[in-house]
Image (tube, rainbow, N blue to C red):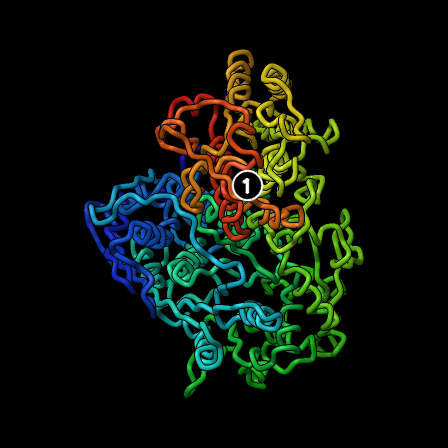
Amino acid sequence: MPSISSSTDSLSALEVIDRLVVGPIKLEPRRLTAAYTVVRNGTENRTDLIYSYEEKVFDPEEPESWNLASLVAAQVALNYGLFCRSIVFRGTYDDIDRQFLRNMAENTSREIYVNKILSPNPFLKGEAARMLPEKKDKYCRASIKFVKAPEKAPKTAWNLWPSEKHRHCILSSGGKDSLLTYGLLDEIDYDVHPVFVNESGRHWFTALNTYRYFREHVPNTARVWVNSDRVFNWMLQHLPFVRQNHASIRSDMYPIRLWTVAVFLFGILPLVRKRKIGRILIGDEFDTSVRTSFKGIRHYSGLYDQSVFFDTSLSRYYMRKGWSLSQFSVLRPLSELLIQKVLTEQYPHLQEHQISCHAAHKEEDRIRPCGRCEKCRRIISMLMAIDADPRHCGYTDRQIQACLETFDASRIHQEAAATEHIGHLLLAKGLIGKAGAPAPEFKPHQEIMKMRFDPTYSPMDAIPVDLRQPLFGLLRSHGIGAVVRKGNKWKEFTPSVSAEALTPYPFEIDFNSNQRHQNDTSSSSPSVNFLWGELTWQEAEKRLNEIDIALLPVGAIEQHGPHLPLDTDAFDADYLARRVAMACSSPVPVVLPLIPYGVSYHHEDFKGTISISNDVLSRLVYEIGLSAAQNGIKKLVIINGHGGNSPALNYAAQMINRDAHIFVCVDTGETSDVDISRVTETPNDVHAGEIETSTSLAVRANLVKMDRAVRSVPEFSSRYLDFTGKRGILWYAHTRKISTSGVMGDPTKASAAKGERIWETMVAHLVALVEDLKNMTLEDIYHRRY
């Protein structure tokens, strides 16, 4: 039978479901139930997706619980955008959620098309099994619609989650990755919460041995039950191009799904929120997923939901939502073989519970691996290569021998260098290679047995700063060295003395150090540098072909009371711009050099203040804006660190817009002030008070002289004169007439903890703004379209 011609819209043959409806949702304190309804050929079928928790995680009277439940319920459906004409989400979703779900539905549709339809797939039949590649702008066939939930689920307000960064949730299973992640975090004495997701069906067998051990020996162990496996199998009934006997086909892949990890991740978020956990750790090794092309179709050569790209995308989403949560893997620098070696040698009490086999079975009170599948061949070959005993985690002598006899590098699903190194070790030990037959050739790759730092696959800044030194030190104490990629070669490397070791983690602000410098947010890699002033002209040309948005920080050099440095406004504006750029998706916006001086005449009675006029500042910003526009910038976000600059900056923004016809905005805190007001308690706190002292304590406490901080909260004879009043008018006065100390507020109420929340809030909102602007043309900005 001939293949389908790529000249037609062959993807239409995959549109077999008229409508998939997710919801309505039923919410209980320990349980959520979401209806999944498929409408096909005029027939309607329904099943329920259920998540069940061991403790109360939802409040049915709380809007945030409904929003979180809606997002949990939506994840399974993202696997079917290629096969539906319409997907309807009935729940509580904000604009950030809608954008995220649409983006991930499109990404997953493309990945399924390449990796499940165009690639060999034993589960397919008919036209779907014979498709030729067809390049399109969009692969999600479904129109995605959102229908408001019932009146029980009111609109949610943006709110920064209270979380603790020292609390770590490990997405746990019986696999070596999550076991080693727990072992390492436990050894360096962090607060660890192992959370297991109990899938309905036999997949739970892989986690059962470990879960039983953790439940008895590890505090904070938790389990979330979900029937997603049953829902996935139920969906297969509605895909006629999937073989009916799919359950009997032996394969190490799922028939269709590729958006799977998120089904577990979002499922544990209610528990993460309830326990005020600040970090989610996923056990993923050295990542070889890259953006590549298949017959002209851009996609990921690997599992997207196990890649570093997935971690950064989810962390950015959490940030924009205000969830004060980040997601990463501490195992990114380690190969799969090295993970197995460290786990086996350092934590044998954990390794004995390892089950990586999805065809595992029960024998008496233990779960045993099948010893025949690709994962079993991989585990046994790795254990034997490092002189470990596979019997320790349940394999029999017969299984070990059979797996070694059938070892074939081409049938091992891992990075090629690791497979070759395993083959080299097994061959050297005489464990593979038939007598009398030509010996297979396997090259050694010594870098496999070291920590590997690569700017794409395993960047050092993919792990928070406070974890790096204890983690890398622990691995070094176990005899593990490190290498860094320089061009196409690996070079010996000492992480503790490298400049990269201090590169900030993009999704958290490191509040542990008392010393901060202006350049501490510089990019460690020239290929991703976002600082305009550090680029060569060739690099600038390349960057400006990729991105059309720039951030311009503007500050002031002026008195900030007897306790804060003169450059507070300048530092804060520059620091904020850099942190926002770091947390944005690629291509990141460029950050223009700071304008440190501002309109500060009202502080000139205090020594140290350097002021320029409104005319000078507005003219300078105007000229910079026009020049930036000539370079290709179409969206300019001015980040203003000093309220006194606002009239000049707003005027400059108007003139740039008039003459360059680009989008210009000024943020003097407007995106975040309403949320910051919930953190602080001082009225009329406008200068060197509770807010600015808190933010300074959070990032450079060494420059704050709290012993000199004085309270000076201005009180006025009319409420219309209150600076922070809802009905207050704009008015101007010399500071000395209002405060002899230069303080207008109460710095004695400041704290680093408040400052941390303020920084997180400001960064989150500006990242959300920039991400929105990046995804819009100038026409889109003026006319909202769906």
Quarter-of-image position of residue 366: bottom left
Question: Mark 1 packing: few (<14 Cα in 10 Å), some, or many (20+)?
Answer: many
Q: Please state which of residues 83 and 699 is positioned toward the viewer in this rendering.
A: 699
Q: Residue 53, position in %: x, y?
A: 33, 67
Above or below: residue 124 compared with residue 19:
below
**Residue 316 position in % (x across, y down):** 50, 46
Q: Is residue 61 left or right of residue 652?
A: left
Task: State the residue at coordinates (41%, 22%).
Answer: 782
Q: Nearer the viewer, residue 110 or 255?
A: 110
The quadrant where residue 566 appears: top right
Residue 332 x, y percent position in the rendering: 62, 59
Q: Residue furthest bottom?
A: 364
Q: Would residue 526 be seen by someone viewing this image from the given angle?
A: yes
Give the amino acid type for the residue marked by disc 1 in the picture.
Glu
- Quadrant for the C terminus, please: top left
**Residue under the point 33% across and 56% down:** 236
For disc 1, the marked residue is: 692
Q: How many marks?
A: 1
Q: Is residue 313 above or below residue 349?
A: above
**Residue 374 visible in rendering:** no
Which residue sits at x=28%, y=58%?
59
**Residue sitting at 58 percent across and 86 percent down?**
397
> 490 left or right of 711?
right
Q: Position of residue 550 (x, y in %)?
A: 59, 29
| Near-viewer residue (699 or 257) | 699
Between 234 and 404, the one lying in front of the other is 234
Q: Residue furthest right?
A: 492
List the single residue furthest toward the top: 659
Q: Secondary structure at mark 1?
A: helix
